[in-house]
Amino acid sequence: MHVGFIGLGSMGQGMAANLLAAGHDVTVWNRSPEPVKALQAQGARAAETPAEAASEGVVLSMLADDAAVRAVILDGGVLDALPKNGIHANHATISVRLARELTERHAKRKLHYIAAPVFGRPDMAAAGKLNVVCAGHAASLERLQPLFDAVGQRTWPLGDDPVRASVAKIAGNFMLASAIESMAEASALTRAHGVSASDFLEIMTQTLFAAPAYQGYGKLIAESRYEPAGFPVRLGFKDVGLALQAGDDARVPLPFAGVAREALLEALAGGDGERDWASLATIAARRAHLDERDAD
Amino acid sequence: MHVGFIGLGSMGQGMAANLLAAGHDVTVWNRSPEPVKALQAQGARAAETPAEAASEGVVLSMLADDAAVRAVILDGGVLDALPKNGIHANHATISVRLARELTERHAKRKLHYIAAPVFGRPDMAAAGKLNVVCAGHAASLERLQPLFDAVGQRTWPLGDDPVRASVAKIAGNFMLASAIESMAEASALTRAHGVSASDFLEIMTQTLFAAPAYQGYGKLIAESRYEPAGFPVRLGFKDVGLALQAGDDARVPLPFAGVAREALLEALAGGDGERDWASLATIAARRAHLDERDAD
Amino acid sequence: MHVGFIGLGSMGQGMAANLLAAGHDVTVWNRSPEPVKALQAQGARAAETPAEAASEGVVLSMLADDAAVRAVILDGGVLDALPKNGIHANHATISVRLARELTERHAKRKLHYIAAPVFGRPDMAAAGKLNVVCAGHAASLERLQPLFDAVGQRTWPLGDDPVRASVAKIAGNFMLASAIESMAEASALTRAHGVSASDFLEIMTQTLFAAPAYQGYGKLIAESRYEPAGFPVRLGFKDVGLALQAGDDARVPLPFAGVAREALLEALAGGDGERDWASLATIAARRAHLDERDAD
Amino acid sequence: MHVGFIGLGSMGQGMAANLLAAGHDVTVWNRSPEPVKALQAQGARAAETPAEAASEGVVLSMLADDAAVRAVILDGGVLDALPKNGIHANHATISVRLARELTERHAKRKLHYIAAPVFGRPDMAAAGKLNVVCAGHAASLERLQPLFDAVGQRTWPLGDDPVRASVAKIAGNFMLASAIESMAEASALTRAHGVSASDFLEIMTQTLFAAPAYQGYGKLIAESRYEPAGFPVRLGFKDVGLALQAGDDARVPLPFAGVAREALLEALAGGDGERDWASLATIAARRAHLDERDAD
């Protein structure tokens, strides 16, 4: 299939590569040129502008946040470039508000906006093992399925309103934040009573919580290894903010999100914005003055 | 091995039965007679008093809470009955304070107190699949190992201070409460935006959160099935209280525990103390007035 | 003094009237015509546009929120209309972000932006009894002093950066929200133990908390009188949001603001957006199911 | 009137002295002898035991907490010593649970338990300016009125169930904790935006929050003066715990109390248990890393 791909960050590179590997004809665009060259070496064509990448009628994008989507997709002329019935599938985590706006703006031009956020880190993107949550125009979803198969291990369709996929992704990231905060507090508690985070989390993540989210972040906490960040505090704060905003819009109180937000903000205040958000464990320990105790 | 077993509730019955099945010589005691008869039919001897069950020198107990442990073990004469170097292994979830007191009171009499709380529900107790977290006198732990093997799938030793095993169990139950509250809030959020709890939690519990804790409670939330309770709100409130108390004693703030506590208390105020604590999902939905919206 | 006044809502009407009463020459503008006529009857001149109201060189504005300030002041051409060294004093409660933006945009055009938010309700505006918190260009503040004297009982200058006055107003409103939530929870607690909100709050507001904020809102809670709203839940939610946003910008965690936010959002979810924010007392009571108890 | 007075701490001393000054015949008891001698010099008689102080039939007590009341009143034989229809008025802040137990234990012996907690610090006790909140047997309250008049500026009766006065006192102290936390967060916010706590709190405590609670604690925060403590973090933590426990007993969620509790616990973890609880302001500042910023 002819497909455009916009946004070759750590996630987008792997995704675009897997599309090429699956035999698709991919035209890529990225703000900086290096990732473009790497993909050209794998057979991609390079577009001069985002709009050019959209001209074939199906374009995927994987951009950082709301601001990047506005700048590249809306201001970049992608909607103007898409032919009638063209499809834009957005893999990024964006706000429910922007998802709704994009849905409407595409519809007005007889284009199809598909929300297709993904769960998985860059290594899973590279391995084609993402989980793709998607929603939007049914026939378009069907048409995109071979592309989703190339980048993901499984597709999770949520119906025809793109907002649904966006909110599911936001809620999922909020659950991740909660899992981390929960491990952070629990291991501060055990540590203060003589059980190391490592010993405690080993039990938890091999029994009741034997799941990727807990095992991955539990390992970082057990080893106090927060750099380089897989997912930094800065973005975690943004995503918990998206959950709270989605809660505002639909009038849903989210007290855990409020608490996670404060902890992430305390981490930001301490200058830890670029550390992995598993470093919430250091905030829980700081509030209990645990390191000072160990130093005694 | 000759062993006494005190407390034949839904957990204790299965554990004692597995000790018998493994060939041990078990003397049981329970406040009410029915479970005693059932175990006699499987080969157990019945003790008249808790003290009698302890007279052979090794006694296990599985009682409801701090008050039951005080009433049955301390007031029941178990420490008087245990011979010198006798072992008492406590499988119940009790406070850090009582764990410390028991440790000291056993030590004064040259007895060994072993904390051996378990993770797992009654069906896992019946199947001999519990996870046994334990701490205390090393030689005693070694001696108890065949018993732990009979009731559990794996033993997780945490050193020589019994308090360590107690706090690990308490922290684990707090992580369960947090997992439930997190699913409760996240699915209220998705539901308000058009994604059912069932659809959302299916994705989560088959991907990032594919672990027993999430799958078990996620299913209850997806199906709004809170009766009969596997673990009731009333006990969940008690256990989150144990976490907060353990935090008080060691000066560890636990903001998530505070929030979970308020939600469980709201459930109690609404008369839901005997429903499964997965019904925290109804509290999150109530705060967002979701059922009234559906009724429109 | 020749002065323009933009925004004749319930607050602005009283303020403009007091300016006239003090002998100033006032040109008013308002989106809807009725309040303009009322002030013309008191001697004001009517401007056709916001820009016209600014043409004399000193303009005050009292608009609802960030959006209104953007629409009327920025899109309304006020900055274009102000002569060099002109002064715009903004009495509204706006975000720290917009305060900073306005400061910069005025400075670029050699204009002076003064933040002059006020504490006080419409009756105090009508009586000329507001408390005016202000910050900005020192000589401009001096020039404005007679105007502040006409509308307020006292002026509280906070230096030359307008953001300072904005954040003080936002923090003050957050303290009001906290005072209300505190009374809401405390009186739910006493009520559940047999002491009416009225009896309890009478003691508090005549002793330790004998201050206008507590006496005013305490009375509304004691009498369950939430309509018509002095200050509605909807605006309270907005203002607590401004505090959280100001905290984000400066990396200051505000856990009380987070909790107040959830309670206000629960009120909004229940359809109480237009009731006085003292109705947080009904949220605290709802969480404890107090009304159902009384009905028994 | 003949009256016994038990407990001559910083509050009790002033109260007993005022009873003497009003012409009452006071028999005092205290664990340590120094305050007894001081009061003997003012005309008091010294009792050898708490029971002796109760033998005349009316005894007041002002003890530190639940444990002290149990040790001195219950274990000290006060109930045995009181003649039939004797009155014990308790001025201390104790738990709702103990208030209920004391009510029942007095009633069983045909004695009258009066809860008469007071608002006011030691200087107000010395000046006879306390606010006395009271509840219990009506005729006994009437009999005690001259005593309350001697120690207080005003009496606030709450009916015949002593629990009512206890819960009002607990709820009042929770409101104080909330007022402090609210000032702590608000002034961290303004400080981060360039407005000192001193400037900000001066405005607040002279306008909307012109009440003793805010002015007293606001001054401590503005001056960062937390030693010597008027009321230490340690006792504040205990009292917020009493509010939460009273909420548990009556099923009333108190989210603000939960947040205040975490902040006080963080202060305790940092070794600040004996500083004034106004030092919550340092916790809010610590979470925002404000002191490190100032040091730059």
Image (cartoon, coloured by chain):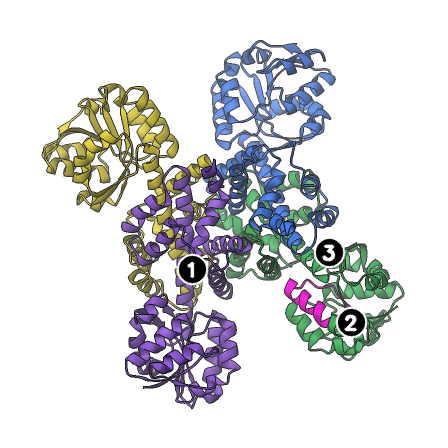
Chain colours: A green, B blue, C purple, D yellow
Q: Which residue is under mark 1?
A: C228
Can I make out residue A121 in this image? yes
Q: Chain of mark 2?
A: A
Which residue is painted at 31% across and 45% down in the image?
D231
Say which residue label 2 marks.
Answer: A111
Residue C58 is marked as none
| Nearer to the camera, D123 or D36 | D123
Q: Give the quarter of the image for residue B35.
A: top right
Q: What is the spatial separation of the Cα atoms under label 1 and label 3, in whole angstroms?
A: 51 Å
Q: Are the numbered discs 2 and 1 placed on the same chain, yes or no?
A: no
Which residue is painted at 59% across and 42% down in the image? B280
Asked if badges 3 and 2 are on one and the same chain, I answer: yes
Pointer 3 chain: A
Chain of the residue where label 1 is placed in the rendered structure: C
Q: Quadrant of residue C138?
A: bottom left
Residue B136, how many percent across, how many down?
Answer: 57, 27
| SS label for mark 1 | loop
Q: Is residue D36 magenta?
A: no
In this figure, which residue is indicated by the disc labeled 3? A120
Is C124 above or below relative to B4?
A: below
The amino acid sitting under disc 2 is: Leu
Residue C270, how many percent across, how many down?
54, 53
Answer above or below: position of B25 versus A121: above
| Mark pair 2, 1: CA separation | 47 Å
Which residue is painted at 59% across and 16% down in the image? B30
The segment highlighted magenta reads A87-106
**C40 sits to left or right of D13:** right
